[in-house]
Amino acid sequence: MEDPMRTGILIDELGVGFDAITAQAREAAKLGYDTLWVAQRGGWDALTALPALAAAAPGVGLGTCVVPTYSRHPITMAAQALTVQAAAGVPVHLGLGLSHKFIVEGEFGYSYDRPLRHLREYLQALNPLLRGEKADVHGESLTAAGAVNAPGAERPAALVGSVSPQSMRLAGELADGVITTFAGPRATAEFVVPALGSASRVVSGQLICVTSEVDEARKRIDELYGGAGNVPAYRAILDREGHERVSDSAIVGDEETVRRRVKSLEDAGATELLVMPVGSAEEQARTRELLAA
C-alpha cells in the first residue's frame, strides 16, 4: 500500500511582522500539518526563518519554496542549509530554483544565459556539499571547489522549483524531486511524473480557497496572482493544464469540492500537497482547518 499524500502549508510572510509568522507556525502545528513552508519573495529570508519556526512548532518539518540559486553560491547555500538543519533538529526540505529572467537580470544584475546549464552545474556542486563531501566543479557558469565542515548535520532534501520539461528531467537526475506551482492533475500525470521518474517527490503547490462564493474568490485570485500568467514559465504550465487564467488552476469551492480536487492530485502522482490558502480571513481559516484533517 502506498503512503498517503503528506500535507504542508505555506506560511504567509508577505508584509507581516515576524511575530505573525511564528503565530501561523504554532497554529499549523496545532492543526497537524506535516511541513511548514516559507517562500522567498523579496521580504524575510526563507532559510534564516526556519529555526524560529522550529522553535514555535517543535517537531514539524520545514521547507523553502524556493530560494534562488543565482544569489547564493552552492558552498554558501550548503553551509546555510546544513546550519539550519542542525539548528532546527527536524527534516529540512531545501527548495531551490532558477527564479525568472526579469528577477535575475533586472534585480540581481546577473546573466540568465543558459539557465539549465547553470542549474545542472549548481546541483552537481551542491549535492556533495550537502553530504559533507568536497565539491569540485569547474563549469561554464560557476566554480565550486571546497567543502562545508558541519559535523553532525543531516543532509537536507533538495527539491527544485520546476515547471519545464528540461528542469523536471534534471531534478529527477540530480535532486530529490520538485515543487510545482499551478500544475493540476493533468499536467502532474502527463508531464511532471513522466519527466521526473516515479521515485521522485512531487510537492504540489496549490492556491486553495474553501468558500461558497466561488466567482468572487476566483476574481480575487486573478487580482492578486493574475500577473503570473504572463511569466513564460508559469504560462507554459497553465497551458499544459488547459487553463487561461491563474484562477482557473486554483482549487476553489466547498469542502467536498476541495477534497475531491486534492484527491485527484494524489491520484495523478503528487506525493505532497503544499497548501497556499487564499481568500478572506474566514475562508483561509476554513481552508487551513479542512486540509489539516
Image: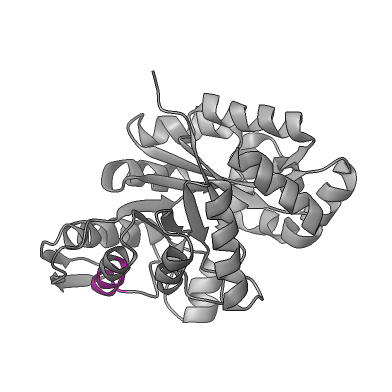
Determine which quarter of the picture holds residue 115. bottom left
Tell me if I can see residue 241 in this picture: yes
User: Which residue is at 47% across, 80% downward?
Assistant: 108
Determine which quarter of the picture holds residue 130. bottom left
Task: Return the x and y of residue 22 as percentages of the image width and height.
Answer: 55, 69
**Residue 154 colored in magenta in the image:** no
Q: In this view, does 282 lie above or below 153?
A: above
The magenta-colored residue range is 73-81
Task: Return the x and y of residue 256 as percentages of the image width and height.
Answer: 74, 28
Q: Which of 77 and 210 is in front in this view?
A: 210
User: Which residue is at 63% across, 52% downward?
Assistant: 276
* Residue 172 horizontal side relative to residue 135, left or right: right
Q: Nearer the viewer, residue 251 or 246?
A: 251
Q: In this view, does 28 lie above or below 23?
A: above
Determine the main secondary structure of the stretch shown in magenta: helix
Tell me the quarter of the image containing the C terminus: top right
Task: Return the x and y of residue 64 as percentages of the image width and height.
Answer: 45, 60
Task: Return the x and y of residue 204 as percentages of the image width and height.
Answer: 53, 42
